[in-house]
Image: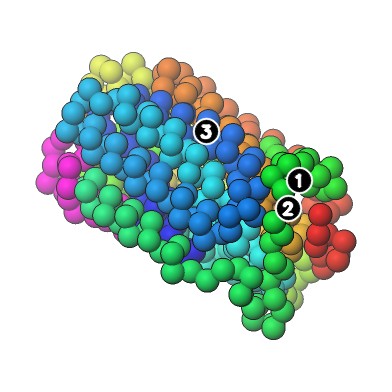
C-alpha cells in the first residue's frame, strides 16, 4: 500500500517531470517551479521526522499526498491559461512542503517493517511499485500524444494524472498504524515515541551527534536528485519531440524497476557477508557512473542551448540515431534506481529504529532536495548544458568516495542493539 501511495502521487509527478519541462514547450516555468518545490522540500524534510512521530505515519502520508495533486492541477491550469506561471511556481512550493512529509514517513516505514535480512528486498519491491507509477503515467502520455505534432502534452494527459493523484490521496486512510504491525519473524515494529515538539526538534541534533557517520553519506544524499535536471530537461526535453519524450520516460522508469530489484537482491544475498555486499554495491555504482557519463559526453558535446534556440531538429523514435540514445537513457534509469536503493540500504544498515530512521531519511530528503533546488534554478537561468552535465558527473563520483569511510567503519554484519535507539 505504501508503494501504491507513491505510485499514484510521486510516480505521476516523475512521469510529468521525466517528459522534460513538465510536458511544456518552454521548460523555464517548470524548472523554476521545481527549484521552489525542492527548496521547501529541503527545509521541511528536516522536520518531517518530528511531524511523522507526532501525528503518525498515516496522517503524515495523507497530508503529503495532497501537494502532488495540486502540482498536477497547476500544470493543467497553465496549459489552459499560459499566464498562470505564478500559480505553477506557488503550487510547486506547496508540493515541496507536502513532499517533505510524505517521503519522511515513507522512508521510516520502508526501513522499519522488514527484518534485517529483508531490507534490500523491501526497498526493491517498494521502488518497483513506485516507479511503475511513472511507467503507467508515461504510457498514458505516449498514447495521448502519439499523433501530436505539438511541443507540449494535451489537457487529457494532465487530467488523467490528476485523477490518479486523487486516488493516491485516499490510500493512507486505509492503511494500518505501524504499532499494529508484526514482522515476518514474529517481532513487533518498534513503536514510534511521541515526545514534546521541543524534544523532537532537539532529536534532529541528537541523531546527528550520536551517529556522526551519517555525515559521510551527505554528499551521496546531495547528489541523488542533481542528475535529474540534465537527464529530464537537458537531454530528454532538449533533443526529442513530445511523443518520443513520453516513450523515453516510459522506458527510463521501466529500467528503474529492474535496477532497483537487481541491486536489492544483491544487497540481501545471504551467501555473501554484509560488508562485502556494501562494497559490491559501491563498486557497481562507480562503474555505472563512469559508463553513463562517458557515453553521454559524446552526445552532450554536440549541442548547446543556442542550437536549440536556432531550431535544432528534434529526434523522433523512428529516426536511425534514436536506438543508441534510448539505450543511454535506459542506463541512466538503472543508475538512478541503484543509487537510491543503495543509499536507503546503507541507512538501514545503521539502525532498525523507526524514529532514528525517520531522522536519517529527513536528512536524506533535505540534502537531496537542497541540491535539486540549486540545479533546477541553474537550469531555469539557462546555465550551459555542459556545465550542468559536468557538475552531475563530479558530484556522483565525490558522493561515492565520501561514503567509503562510512562503509568501512559503520556497516557491520549485524546492527548492534545500541544502534536501535536514540
Say if the magenta span includes residue 138: yes
x and y percentages locating residue 63 in the rendered image: 46, 50
Q: Which residue is mark 2?
A: 195
Q: Which residue is mark 3?
A: 40
At 86% from the left and 52% from the top, the residue drawn is 409
Q: Secondary structure at mark 1?
A: helix
The reply to whether callout 3 and callout 1 are in contact (CB within 8 Å) is: no
Q: Residues within 10 Å of mark 2 (few under 14, many from 20)?
A: few
Q: Which residue is mark 1?
A: 199
Q: Secondary structure at mark 3?
A: helix
Bounds of the magenta segment: 136-156
Task: Report the residue that reaches farthest toward the bottom.
Answer: 186
Total marks shown come to: 3
Spatial separation of the CA atoms under disc 2 and disc 3:
25 Å
Task: Report the residue that reaches farthest toward the front.
Answer: 196
Q: Is residue 259 visible?
A: no
The answer to whether residue 419 is left or right of residue 8 is: right
Please name which of the two marks, 3 or 1, marks the residue nearer to the observer.
1
x and y percentages locating residue 406 in the rendered image: 80, 48
Q: Is residue 39 visible?
A: yes
At 28% from the left and 41% from the top, the residue drawn is 73
Amino acid at each position: 500500500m505504501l508503494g501504491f501511495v507513491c505510485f499514484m502521487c510521486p510516480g505521476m509527478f516523475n512521469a510529468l517531470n521525466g517528459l522534460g519541462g513538465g510536458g511544456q514547450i518552454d521548460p523555464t516555468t517548470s524548472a523554476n517551479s521545481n527549484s521552489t518545490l525542492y527548496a521547501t522540500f529541503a527545509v521541511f524534510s528536516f522536520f518531517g521526522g518530528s511531524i511523522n512521530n507526532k501525528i503518525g505515519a498515516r496522517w503524515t502520508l495523507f497530508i503529503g499526498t495532497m501537494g502532488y495533486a495540486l502540482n498536477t492541477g497547476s500544470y493543467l491550469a497553465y496549459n489552459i491559461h499560459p499566464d498562470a506561471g505564478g500559480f505553477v511556481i506557488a503550487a510547486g512550493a506547496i508540493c515541496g512542503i507536502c513532499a517533505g512529509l510524505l517521503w519522511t514517513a515513507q522512508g521510516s516505514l520502508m526501513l522499519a517493517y522488514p527484518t534485517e535480512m529483508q531490507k534490500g528486498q523491501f526497498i526493491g519491491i517498494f521502488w518497483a511499485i513506485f516507479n511503475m507509477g511513472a511507467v503507467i503515467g508515461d504510457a498514458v502520455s505516449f498514447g495521448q500524444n502519439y499523433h501530436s505534432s505539438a511541443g507540449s502534452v494535451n489537457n487529457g494527459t494532465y487530467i488523467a494524472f490528476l485523477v490518479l493523484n486523487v486516488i493516491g490521496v485516499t490510500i493512507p486512510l486505509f492503511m494500518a498504524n505501524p504499532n499494529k504491525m508484526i514482522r515476518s519473524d514474529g517481532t513487533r515494529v518498534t513503536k514510534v515515541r511521541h515526545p514534546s515538539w521541543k524534544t523532537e526538534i532537539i532529536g534532529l541534533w541528537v541523531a546527528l551527534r550520536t551517529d556522526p557517520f551519517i555525515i559521510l553519506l551527505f554528499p551521496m544524499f546531495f547528489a541523488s536528485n542533481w542528475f535529474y535536471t540534465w537527464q529530464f530537461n537537458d537531454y530528454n526535453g532538449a533533443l526529442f519531440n513530445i511523443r518520443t519524450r513520453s516513450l523515453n520516460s516510459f522506458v527510463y522508469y521501466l529500467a528503474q524497476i529492474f535496477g532497483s530489484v537487481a541491486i536489492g537482491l544483491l544487497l540481501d544475498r545471504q551467501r555473501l557477508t554484509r560488508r562485502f555486499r556494501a562494497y559490491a554495491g559501491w563498486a557497481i555504482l562507480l562503474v555505472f557512473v563512469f559508463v553513463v557519463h562517458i557515453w553521454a559526453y559524446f552526445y552532450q558535446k554536440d549541442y548547446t542551448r543556442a542550437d536549440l534556440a536556432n531550431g535544432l531538429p528534434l529526434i523522433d523514435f523512428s529516426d536511425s540515431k534514436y536506438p543508441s540514445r534510448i539505450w543511454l537513457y535506459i542506463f541512466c534509469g538503472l543508475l538512478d534506481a541503484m543509487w537510491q536503493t543503495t543509499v536507503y540500504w546503507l541507512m538501514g544498515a545503521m539502525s532498525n529504529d523507526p524514529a532514528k530512521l525517520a531522522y536519517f531519511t529527513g536528512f536524506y530528503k533535505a540534502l537531496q532536495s537542497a541540491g535539486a533546488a540549486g540545479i533546477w534554478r541553474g537550469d531555469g537561468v539557462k546555465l550551459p548544458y555542459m556545465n550542468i552535465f559536468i557538475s552531475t558527473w563530479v558530484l556522483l563520483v565525490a558522493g561515492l568516495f565520501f561514503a567509503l569511510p562510512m562503509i568501512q567503519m559503520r556497516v557491520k554484519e549485524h546492527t548492534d542493539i545500541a544502534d536501535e535507539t536514540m
